[in-house]
Image (cartoon, grey):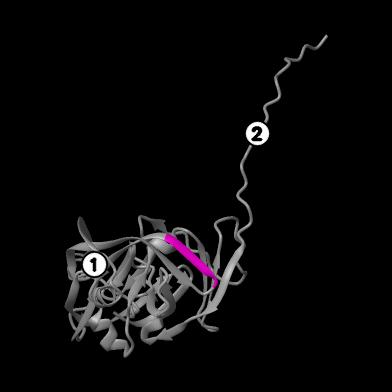
Amino acid sequence: MLLLPVLPSLAQEEFVPPQAKLLTRFRFQQYSGGVILLRGTLDNHTDSLNFILDTGSGGISLDSTTAEKMGVTTEMSDRTIRGIAGLKKVAFAYNHTLRLPGLVVEKLDFHINDYDLLTSVYGIQIDGIIGYSFFRRYIVRIDFDKEELEVFSPGTFRYPRGGYLLKPSFSTLPLPYLEVEDNISVNARFIFDTGAAMCFLMSNDFAEDSALMRKSRKRYLTQVEGLGGKKRMDYTIVKSLKIGPYKFRKVPA
C-alpha cells in the first residue's frame, strides 16, 4: 500500500492593480531643446500661466514675480534644494491647486524661484515648473510629434510596441544607466531631464575624474539657469551617447 501525505491546499492571493484610465488629453507647445510648455491656472485665478514640464525637477515651483503679482502667500522654509547652480534655501506656497485642461491637481506645495532668465530665453513669461509633485501621481504619455500630452490614473499600463522600455531607478528623479563615449567609454546613471533644453549635461568633477573628455575638445562659454540661480558653463560635444539600443553620435554637451 502506498501512503501519500495529505497537505493543506495553499491559496495564493495577489492584488492586481486596475487598468490605468485616461483622465485628460491636451496639446502643448514645444520650445528650443524640446522643452515642453503647458498652460494652466492656479487655484481660482482665471489668468493662464505658463509652466515647463520637467522630469528633472524634484517638486513643483512658481516664479517669484508671478507669486507676488497674484498675491500668493509664501513662507520661508528650512528646506534646501539642490539645483544646477548649487544649493538654495527656498520659500514655499502651501496647499494650492493646479488646473490643467481636463484635470485638477490639489494639495500642491510650490517652492518659489526666480525665472526671469528663462523668460528672456524663450521670449514668453515662464510662471513655473511642473516636476515630481505632478509625475508621482499619474502616468504621463508625451507625443512629441503631435505635441500632445495624455494623463492616466495609476494602474496597469500597456506600452506600445516598437520602442525600448527603460527601467530607471528613482529618488525623486528618474536615473537610467547610459553609456557616454569620448576619450573613453563610461557607464553611469544620469538624470533623465526633459527640462534641460540640452542633449547632455555633466559636472566638471565627473568629466575630470572619469577622464571622459578628449583634451583637444573645444569648449564655448555659455550661461544657464536652474534652481539655485544662474551659472556659467562650457558647451562642447561628446563622441557618442547610448540609451538602451539607441546610439547617438556627436552629441552636444
Q: Is residue 190 visible?
A: no
Residue 249 in percent (x, y) is at: 38, 81
Asked whether 125 or 13 is in front, the reply is 125
105 magenta-colored: yes
Q: Quick one: label 1 or label 2, which is nearer the N terminus?
A: 2
Q: Secondary structure at mark 2?
A: loop
Q: Which residues are magenta?
A: 102-106
Residue 11 in percent (x, y) is at: 68, 30
Q: Amino acid at mark 2?
A: Gln
Residue wearing tag 2: 12
Give the left or right position of residue 53, taking residue 102 as reference. left
Residue wearing tag 1: 83
Which residue shows up at 72% across the image and 15% down it?
5
Indicate the quadrant containing the C terminus: top left, top right, bottom left or bottom right: bottom left
239 magenta-colored: no
Residue 130 in percent (x, y) is at: 38, 69
Residue 247 in percent (x, y) is at: 43, 76
Q: How many residues crowd mark 2 within 10 Å: few (<14), some (14–19), many (20+)?
A: few
Asked whether 180 or 141 is in front, the reply is 141
Marks 1 and 2, how far apart at CA: 46 Å
Q: Main secondary structure of the magenta part?
A: strand
Q: Residue 3's quadrant in the figure?
A: top right
Give the left or right position of residue 34, taking residue 203 as reference. right
